[in-house]
Amino acid sequence: MRATLKNPIDADSVKGPGRNLSLLLLLTFVVALPSARAANPQVTETSPSLAEIQKAIERGELDAAEKQLWGVVTGDPENAPAISLLGRIRTQQKRFPEAEALFKRVLVIKPDYPAAHRSLGELYLLQGRRDEAELAYQKAHELDPRDAKTSLALGTVYGETGKFERSIEILNSIPAEARPSAALPVLASDYLALHQPDKVAALAPLVLRSAPSDPSLIPRFARVLVENGFVDDAGELLKSAPEKQKLAAEYLLAKVSC
C-alpha cells in the first residue's frame, strides 16, 4: 500500500615547487609581522578587493586568488577576512589541517567572526566531524542569526542528526524571500519524520516556483518523497519538472515506476 499526501502535489592537493609559503611559515608570518590594520581597520570579506577575490575562489581560480591574498596579508598580517579566504582555498584543495589552522588563527584575531565559524563547520562536515560541525554552525548562527547560508547549514545538520523540530524552527526562521531553495527538501524530510505530510504538500508550490532557477530541486524533493513511501506524489511532481531538469527527473521517475 503506497502512502500518499493528503493534499496531492500538482504539478587534489596543490603540488609543485612554486607554492608561496608553507603553513608553518604562514602562521609565523601572520603572528610575527607588525600589524598594519590601521591602514584598513574595517575590511571584511565583502570589501571591494576581497569581494573580487572571493568571486575568483568561487570560479575555481585558486592560484590567482591565493596570490592576491598573499598581497593583502603581507600588508596586513591580522586581516581576518583575508586569512579566512586563504582557509577556504585550503579547504577546496583538501588540505584540511592547514585550513583548520587558518580558520582558528582568524578566531584568535577576531573571535566573533561568523564567517570563520561557518567555514569551520563546512570543513568539519567534509571530514565527517558532525558534532564539531554542529557546534561551529551554532556559534556562527548565534553571531549572525540573519545569515541564510548559516541557518540552512545548521538546519540541515539538525535534520540529519534527528533534531527535526530544531531543524524546522531554524529553517522557518529564514524570511521567505531569503530562504534558499535547498531548504525545501530538508523541511520535507523533517516534516515526514514527524508524520506531518500535510505540511510537505504545502511546500509543493514553493518547489515548483523555485525549480526554474534550481535545476536539481524537483528531483531532490521527489527523492525525499520516495524514500518516505510517497511514490505516487513523487511521480506527479517529477512530471512537472522544467525542461532542463527532465533527464534527472526521468531517471528518478523510471526508478519510481519499477
Image: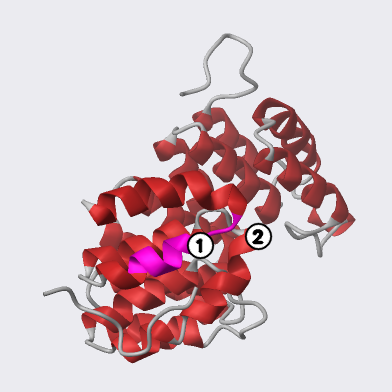
Say which quarter of the image contains residue 180.
bottom right
Instruction: Tell me the amino acid under the disc marked 2.
Output: Ser
- Tally the numbered discs: 2
- Residue topped by disc 2: 213
Question: Depth check: 249 or 169 in front?
Answer: 249
Q: Is residue 89 above or below residue 38?
A: above
Q: Residue furthest top?
A: 17
Q: Residue at x 69, y 38 (%)?
A: 59
Q: Which residues are magenta?
A: 234-242
- Residue topped by disc 1: 118
**Secondary structure mostly seen in the magenta stretch:** helix
Is 202 colored magenta in this rendering?
no
Q: Residue at x 81, y 41 (%)?
A: 75
Instruction: Tell me the amino acid under the disc marked 1.
Output: Arg
Q: Is residue 50 above or below residue 192?
A: above
Say which quarter of the image contains residue 115.
bottom right
- Residue 201's x, y, as percent? 40, 84
- Residue 79's x, y, as percent? 71, 52
Q: Is residue 130 above or below residue 73?
A: below
Do the residues bearing badges 1 and 2 touch, measured as CB atoms within 8 Å?
no
Question: Depth check: 112 or 52 in front?
Answer: 52
Q: Please state if 140 lies on the left or on the right of 66 as rendered.
A: left
